[in-house]
Amino acid sequence: MGKQIWRPGNMLYPLPVVLATVADKKGNTNVLTVAWTGTVSSDPVMAYISVRPTRYSYNMLRETGEFVINLTTEELAFATDYCGVVSGRDVDKFKKMGLTKLSAKEVCAPLIAESPVNIECRVVEEKPLGVHTMFLAEVLAVHADEKYMDEKGKFDLTKANPIVYSHGEYYGLGEKIGKFGYSVKKK
């Protein structure tokens, strides 16, 4: 069997799919689904989201320069999809999806209580890149839900049943198959 050659495209799948929350200076808030997100640096701790300028949240994000990355779960899959296809111009997505707002420690955007991990971010640079603008941000605080801690006090992401996104579809992650360094660990 050979390999097919396709036109250029992003084939880095699966991707994390998150619910990003934003607020404007008047206190209006919104939640949007983002799959273009990830880690930029571990020191300093930085992350990014990429958002189309046509999105309702875009101007809120630019106005305050703040957002929260809220990790998603199988339980949040329906809300994750809904918040990606319905505009906050038309509906209060927090209310419609039964998402609970919590106050953040460092930013004006709210946390989503139902999310197992919330990552508070402040934008340090905007980079227009084609149809999206990348918002590079410093991570200011991380909130982890205590119900996902194991008996040793370590966060157990598998208990949260996180989801990922691939080519228009959502997937659960399945079981752990190894951990960092297991390929060279002495037996």
Image (cartoon, helix red, strand yellow):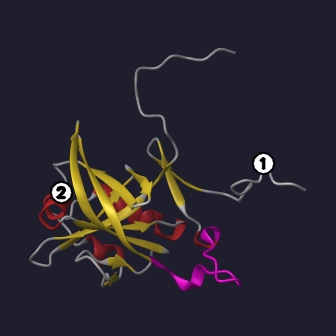
Q: Position of residue 91 (x, y in %)?
A: 20, 68
Instruction: Give above or below for 128 relative to 123.
Output: above
Tell me residue 163's x, y (percent). Answer: 53, 59
Q: Residue at x 71, y 59 (%)?
A: 176
Mark 2 and mark 1 lie on one chain; the one further toward the N terminus is 2
Q: The residue under label 2 is which amino acid type? A: Tyr
Q: Label 2 belongs to which residue? A: 58
Considering the numbered disc 1 on the image, is that residue within a helix, a strand or a loop? loop
Within 10 angstroms of label 2, few (less than 14), some, or many (20 or more) residues? some
Q: Residue furthest right?
A: 187
Q: Residue at x 22, y 53 (%)?
A: 125
Most foreground residue, 167 or 46: 46
Nearer to us of marks 2 and 1 is 1
Instruction: Please state the total of marks drawn on the protein image.
Output: 2
Magenta range is 143-158
Q: Residue at x 62, y 81 (%)?
A: 149
**Contact (Cβ within 8 Å) of mark 2 with mark 1:** no
- Tell me where residue 121 appears, x and y as whole percent: 31, 67
Task: Give the residue pinned by disc 1.
Answer: 183
Q: Which is more toward the observer, 9 or 66?
A: 66
The residue positioned farthest toward the left in the image shown: 26
Q: Quadrant of residue 17?
A: bottom left
Q: Residue at x 58, y 84 (%)?
A: 147
Compared to residue 111, the image places residue 8 above or below, namely: above
In the image, is 66 to the left or to the right of 152?
left
Whether residue 151 is in magenta: the answer is yes
Q: Position of residue 122 (x, y in %)?
A: 27, 66
Q: Which of the two residues, 147 or 84, is positioned nearer the viewer here? A: 147
Which disc, if any, is residue 34? Answer: none
